Amino acid sequence: MKETIRVTLIYGSAREGRFCDTVADWVLSELRELGGCEVSILDPAELTFSGKGPDELSAAAIEAKLETADAFLILVPEYNHGYPAVLKAMIDSAYRPWHAKPVAFVSYGGISGGLRAVEQLRQVFAELHAVAIRDTVSLAHVWSQFDSQGHPFRPAQMKGPLIVMMRRLFWWARALRNARAETVYDSAAA
């Protein structure tokens, strides 16, 4: 039997009226059905930020969630051809907890579906020694993808790519968890 994968689901927006909650509810319902993972949520709307980043308590909460995760799933909107500043502040508040762990993305937005934000994040996570997996779920014109209760209009079409991405994320999570258990990542280059 395969061990449960601990996934930290990171909300990429703290804007009032954000669509992130609708996307997150859909993702969480699909993950419950898929099984094999334990999900914790990291939501910037529940944290405190200033121009310098998260306050001390929020930074500690972020680091603790990242530290215990086997993998990360980031829900990222695209704002003005990029990802939100609050997401960058959360990412930059920790360093080592990202190392040798996989990251997957569910992006959303207008015509590009958030893909420009994801491509920028891939560069950021490479610098953090994290493994950004190739598969991405991208929701173009996201506001037209869900009904007023937050249910997808085309659930099967959306579910397929999410399941493929999550199975690959789980594979990477197991492989990297085993590798981290054998050798401390920082000592691998020593």
Image (tube, grey):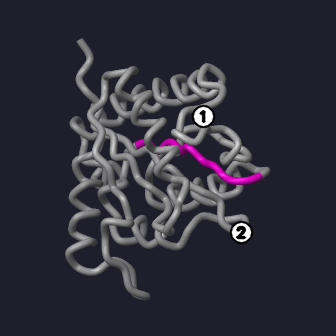
Farthest residue in the top direction? Answer: 1
Secondary structure mostly seen in magenta is strand
Measure the C-alpha gap from mark 1 to mark 2. 23 Å
Q: Which residue is mark 2?
A: 80
Residue span colored magenta: 102-110
Mark 2 is surrounded, within 10 Å at the Cα level, by few (under 14), some (14 to 19) or many (20 or more) other residues, namely few
Q: At label 2, which amino acid type do we have? A: Asn
> Which residue: 27% across, 72% down?
59
Q: Is residue 103 magenta?
A: yes
Relative side of 158 to 80, left or right: left
The kind of secondary structure element at disc 1 is strand
Q: Residue at x 45, y 32 (%)?
A: 169
Rendering coords of residue 57 (x, y %): 20, 75
Q: Is residue 148 above or below residue 168?
A: below
In front here: 51 or 171?
A: 51
Query: In the rendered view of the protein, which quadrant contains the N terminus?
Result: top left
Amino acid under disc 1: Asp
Q: Residue at position x 25%, y 26% from top?
A: 4
Q: Are marks 1 and 2 in contact (CB under 8 Å)?
A: no
**x and y percentages locating residue 65 in the rendered image:** 25, 54
For label 1, the residue is 135
